[in-house]
Image (cartoon, rainbow, N blue to C red):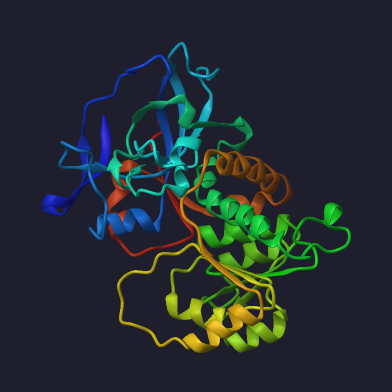
């Protein structure tokens, strides 16, 4: 079967012909892969910044944003049946009995660092025609979401972040009147840094939670990203026209910053302007660049005196995947054109080099393995 892989030892990215997998236990399921999203992580692996093949293999099949269809299921496959659409989780737990996170189905908080991740670390990913995995790692998706379900995995980043925001903010009187009717974020303001797929999906999640949401991005409006932001009821602000101070003047007290840019200098400049009782969420991982100047005294003073919280969020649990599926269905019902607009194009497998090694273009590009 076809598979897109990196060979780190030879610094190669190639379309390979590898052996088709087989079921190995009663709880395993075989998926025919339909769509795989291309993201910054894939591109960074293809530039050999990281990415580790499984033990005994000199190559790593990449890809972690997947949509597949069940074509074979073991007798203990948890009720999954032929034809079910599936989005699979990415991280698998470490094998240490002392890791309380991994032993309680929260490998996204693994203490040891010995987890494995499909398509990233020590486990082959989904940029291939067929995949076998345990049913417990699979999340059924309604068939009505077939055209957009590949967006579930990047949406889980926002779902996990919002879950953590609520768990943190219960420590103070943060809820506003009519919260139940208007969403937990009602009367609060959120700023999203970056208008890539993770940022736009995060903006959708924040709007759905009731936040007055602003997306701050480099591109000058009008552009397709700005159109999506406006369509969901958020506000697009271009860095071409507005400085960070201009943004703060427009927003007011910033209650939540959802960083999805990977730009460290921008992020720390915004941290300095985080509002009272605010939360700053990092989701981007910047590449290695020259150091940037940071006013550490100002940031530390603000964190202490304004009861602020800064945290990072990566990967997601099965519960976050299920929340993402539910929210994506709600997005698709409320803003079908905006959700569809997130996917710039679907391309045959043979186009992999342009998407993985060429200039980044559009919002979300998808490799389609379906005939």
Is 254 in front, or is 217? 254
Closest to the observer, 187 or 173: 173
Measured as percent of width and height from the top left, residue 118 is found at 35, 41
Please identify the quarter of the rendering in which residue 354 is found: bottom left
> Measuring 54% from the left and 83% from the top, which residue is drawn there?
299
Q: Between residue 149 and residue 361, name the one nearer to us.
A: 149
Q: Residue at x 29, y 38 (%)?
A: 124
58 lies left or right of 340: left
Rendered view: 345 above or below 185: above
Q: Visible in this render: residue 97?
A: yes
Q: Position of residue 209 (x, y in %)?
A: 73, 56
On screen, residue 137 above or below 228? above
Residue nearer the viewer, 138 or 294: 294
- For the C terminus, the quadrant is top left
Q: Residue furthest right?
A: 178
263 sits to left or right of 304? left
Residue drawn at 27 percent across, 24 percent down: 20
| 141 is higher (above) or lower (below) than 236 | above
Image quadrant where one finds the N terminus: top left
Vertical relation: 250 (above or below) 308: below
Please tell me in which quadrant of the rendered image residue 306 appears.
bottom right
Q: Where is residue 240 drawn, in percent x and y?
A: 54, 84
Seen as rendered, the residue at the extreme front is 98
Q: Is any atom of residue 239 visible in this view?
A: no
Q: Position of residue 37 (x, y in %)?
A: 43, 47
């Amino acid at each position: 079967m076809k598979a897109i892989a990196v060979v780190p030892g030879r610094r190669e990215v190639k379309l390979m012909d590898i052996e088709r997998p087989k079921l190995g236990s009663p709880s395993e399921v075989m998926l025919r892969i339909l769509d795989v999203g291309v993201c910054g992580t894939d591109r960074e692996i293809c530039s050999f910044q990281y990415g580790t093949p499984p033990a005994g293999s000199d190559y790593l099949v990449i890809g972690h944003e997947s949509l597949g269809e069940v074509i074979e299921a073991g007798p203990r496959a948890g009720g999954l049946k032929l034809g079910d659409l599936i989005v699979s989780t990415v991280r698998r737990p470490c094998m240490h009995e002392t890791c309380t996170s991994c032993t309680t189905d929260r490998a996204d908080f693994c203490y040891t660092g010995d987890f494995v991740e499909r398509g990233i670390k020590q486990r082959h990913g989904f940029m291939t025609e067929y995949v076998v995995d345990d049913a417990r790692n699979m999340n059924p998706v309604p068939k009505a979401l077939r055209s957009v379900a590949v967006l579930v995995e990047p949406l889980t980043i926002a779902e996990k972040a919002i879950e953590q925001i609520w768990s943190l903010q219960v420590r103070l009187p943060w809820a506003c009147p009519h919260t139940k009717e208007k969403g937990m974020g009602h009367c609060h303001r959120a700023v999203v840094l970056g208008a890539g797929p993770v940022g736009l999906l995060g903006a959708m999640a924040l709007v759905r939670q009731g936040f007055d949401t602003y997306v701050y991005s480099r591109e000058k409006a009008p552009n397709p990203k700005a159109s999506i932001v406006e369509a969901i009821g958020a506000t697009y602000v271009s860095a071409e026209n507005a400085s960070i101070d201009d943004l703060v003047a427009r927003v007011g007290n910033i209650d939540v910053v959802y960083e999805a840019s990977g730009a460290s200098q921008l992020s720390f400049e915004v941290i300095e302007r985080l509002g009272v009782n605010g939360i700053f969420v990092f989701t981007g991982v910047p590449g290695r660049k020259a150091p940037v100047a940071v006013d550490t005294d100002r940031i530390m003073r603000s964190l202490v005196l304004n009861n602020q919280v800064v945290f990072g969020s990566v990967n997601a649990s099965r519960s976050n995947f299920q929340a993402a599926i539910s929210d994506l269905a709600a997005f698709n019902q409320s803003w079908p054109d905006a959700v569809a607009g997130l996917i710039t194009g679907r391309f045959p497998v043979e186009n992999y080099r342009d998407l993985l090694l060429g200039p980044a273009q559009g919002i979300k590009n998808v490799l389609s393995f379906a005939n």
